[in-house]
Amino acid sequence: MLSNISTTTYSRSTYRKAVGALFFLQGICFASWGSRIPTIQQNLGLSETQLGMVLFALPVGQMLSLPFTGWLISKIGSYRIVLGSAALYAAVLVVVGAAPTLWLLVLALFFFGILANMVNIAVNTQAVGVESLYDKPIMASFHGLWSLAGFTGAAVGAYMIGNGIVPLQHFLIVMVVTMAGIALSSKFALKQDVNVDPDQPIFVKPDKSLISLGLLAFCSLICEGAMFDWSGVYFKKVVMAEKAWIGAGYTAFMCTMASGRFMADRVASRIGLRKILQASGILIALGLLIAVVFPYLWSSILGFLLVGFGVSSVVPLVYSAAGKSKVMSPGMALAAVSTIGFLGFLLGPPVIGLVAGASSLRLSFTIIAVMGLCVTIVATRTKSL
């Protein structure tokens, strides 16, 4: 195994900028798709049930590609995977925009999901390599760029919708910009990964420390998924917000999640990984409980602001820790942690719906608050942090 990057051609800040650009481009592609979902639904005349089936194709692709992505990266390196999959990711986005029927859209989104996961694991492996050049944590700042891209993509999508530009034309523009960004970044991305083990088998059982990191990601991503899918519903049905304020909770959450990621590295270097994860879990639980106990506009906005700060640092710092695994290469370790964590992202929203249907949405959010507290508990009990 290689324990570090033995030679570098460019300065560490140059590598950091190149990998940061790849994070941003990945976020732009994903946000562009998300911003045009209502338009695509309308253009294809999809019912709510059909749209649900369409949306499910993407995470299915992501989940199915998780087992082999880490192995592939350990075999041929994250450099080739991140550049190739990022380019294909942008190209398949155009196919999504051009899909003329329900089933072709489902197929396109399935491959979009596969490529989304490949880009995600590869670019995070690149980030682990760049972080090894520094004497401090920098992983969260990369994820902050992804979040910033989400805002940018949503804003561009709103502009495209307002000016009557169809998804295909919109996505073609995004593809051209993304391809240009990949071409510029390719020269400065890391050619060599850290802790590479080319003899790693395709299926490896994660050790106890990686399972703990996966559980941290699982608990946090349940909360994150709940915010993405249910924050607007909560403000509409529980907070009883006026129409103009229904999206206020989601906006508050996204703002603090993005800004928190740009601060997390600095805080982690000062107080340590364990303490920041413990504090993150408390913030998630406290924020959700405020929104549940005081379901009014401004108190709920405050609660969602705290939840955003809470989830902002968990996944980036968990990925950073996984990339330093002593028993698996970064790609394999990240894939293992992502597999466990992503289950939380998938399970969270439907569990909320089931509990809300059987009881109430406030009870659902109380359960999610408990999952936030579990972040603190797991972090406290994980000796490797």
Image: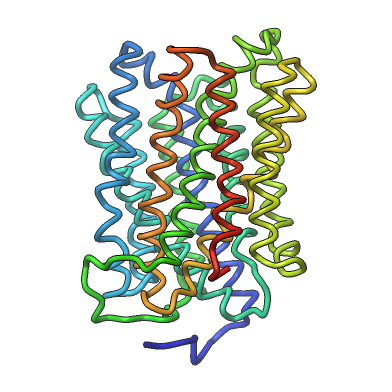
Along the horizontal axis of the image, is 207 left or right of 35? left
In the image, residue 100 above or below residue 208: above
**Residue 324 placement (x, y as % from top left):** 49, 74
Pick the residue in front: 320 or 65. 320
Q: Residue at x 24, y 60 (%)?
A: 68
Along the horizontal axis of the image, is 96 left or right of 378? left
In the image, residue 281 above or below residue 304: below
Residue farthest toward the right in the current orientation of the protein: 298
Residue farthest toward the bottom in the current orientation of the protein: 6
Query: Which quadrant is home to the N terminus?
Result: bottom left
Give residue 291's quadrant in the image: top right
Q: Tell me the colour scheme of the image.
A: rainbow
In the image, residue 68 above or below residue 301: below
Pick the residue in front: 204 or 129. 204
Query: Which quadrant is home to the C terminus?
Result: bottom right
Along the horizontal axis of the image, is 38 left or right of 104? right
Pick the residue in front: 374 or 177. 374
Give residue 122's quadrant in the image: bottom left
| Picture mark count | 0
**Residue 32 placement (x, y as % from top left):** 48, 36
**Residue 66 placement (x, y as % from top left):** 30, 54
Q: Residue at x 31, y 16 (%)?
A: 44
**Residue 124 placement (x, y as % from top left):** 47, 63
Along the horizontal axis of the image, is 308 left or right of 83? right
